[in-house]
Amino acid sequence: MTENIEFYQNQIALARTEIKNLRQRISALKHEHQKEISHIKSTLSSLRCSKCAEEATTVVNNHTHDEGTSSDSQIKYKPIGYIETSFNNKRGLPRQASVMTNSVGVVTIDTNVFTNPEHALSGLEEFSHIWIIYHFHMTESNSTPAKVSPPRLVGEKKGVFSTRSPHRPCPIGLSLVKIHSIQGNKIHFYGVDMVNGTPVLDIKPYIPQYDYPISEANERPPTEGIDLAGLNLNVSSLNITTGYGDMLPSDLLTPLTPSENLDEALSIQRGEPDGQERYIGQASNINQTDVRVASWITNTRNTYQVVFTDESLTRLENLIGSRADSFKTNIMSLLSEDPRSVYVKTKYKDHEYNCVLEDLSITCVFDETSSICTIIAVKSADELQN
């Protein structure tokens, strides 16, 4: 009997030792796992694979020859740079650059494209806004739908070419943004609606005299061959700046008042090539009836009043301190436009909605009856990994 007791005691002691060893091993594996996660996150944040760049710059154009035979030709573009934003995925991403006008992004020109990229940006500081043409690198699909469902129509479908949907045969995006500053090979801009790491295909200055439709009855805007000497031109409405001014793209759509000396200036011979003028003159009067858009574009869209609970507001201030005010402005602009997809709004309309903005995770609830979006929780994005 005594021998049996000693035997079982030895077995119990051995089992305890093994359990202790297992616990230590699990703890070590957990630490190693967390270390690997951190390494993967660091790698992904700086990842710019050659395959992604190749896919981002290949446009396939199918055409038929006169002989009746078909062949495929490829038009290849190399990204001139990449966009840096606080959005690492499409969830919660503003649908247009005008939604979060205070959110700052950066276009970094690739030094492999230009040895001295600042030379390519020379003169851009004279403009207040730019068009950014880029590739929707996160829009991956094996098929291209002929019809899509714009968020405004809540499920109703329209032809893809009558929408701004990223799901297109050639997934190219176009955004009008305001220049904040230009430093070296970086363009800091206001108005973000792109995912971090988006490949940039081209940058063009916004010129209202060219980019806004003009009535056929009006003459071409006087932008070429104008001698500045002797002209008293009022260009205060344009107010080109690269600072923090309050001017928005809509301000530039207002026709400028023609100068009294304009007729005399028009008689001067054509000067510099298009785009290299020293002065951008006033636009002719624009006939607003010549510009039409689909009725669903101008339909009044339901927007939400965004409010914080006391707990979430306190948590926000504790997490980011002095950044809280600017962050509140950005998140309220984003949520007021309801960034949820049609599928989520239809199937999970009463559920909590989560999105990540900058380094914070936001949890909110949309009440369609009262048109109020309540932010109920604010967490550090790092907490989600634990």
Image (cartoon, grey):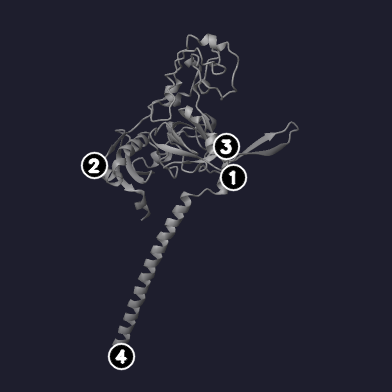
Mark 2 / mark 4, whichever is N-terminal: 4
Residue 37 in which image quadrant: bottom left
In the rendered image, residue 365, in percent from the top left (x then y), is placed at 32, 41
Q: For the residues marked 2 and 4, what is the alpha-carbon distance in whole angstroms?
A: 67 Å
- The residue wearing badge 2 is 310
Which element carries disc 1, helix, strand or loop?
Answer: helix
Q: Nearer the viewer, mark 1 or mark 3?
A: 1
In the rendered image, residue 286, in percent from the top left (x then y), is placed at 49, 15
- The residue wearing badge 3 is 170
User: Is the residue under label 3 in contact with that under label 2 (CB below 8 Å)?
Assistant: no
Which element carries disc 2, helix, strand or loop?
Answer: helix
- The residue wearing badge 4 is 3
Q: Which of marks 1 and 2 is in front?
A: 1
Q: What residue type is labelled 1?
A: Glu
Mark 4 / mark 1, whichever is N-terminal: 4
Q: For the residues marked 1 and 2, what is the alpha-carbon distance in whole angstroms?
A: 48 Å
Mark 2 / mark 3, whichever is N-terminal: 3
User: Relative to 373, is 146 on the left or the right?
Assistant: right
Q: For the residues marked 4 and 3, what is the alpha-carbon distance in whole angstroms?
A: 81 Å
- The residue wearing badge 1 is 54
Indicate the quadrant containing the N terminus: top left, top right, bottom left or bottom right: bottom left
Is 278 rendered above or below residue 244?
Answer: above
Residue 42: tell me if it is visible.
yes
In the rendered image, residue 135, in percent from the top left (x then y), is placed at 53, 39
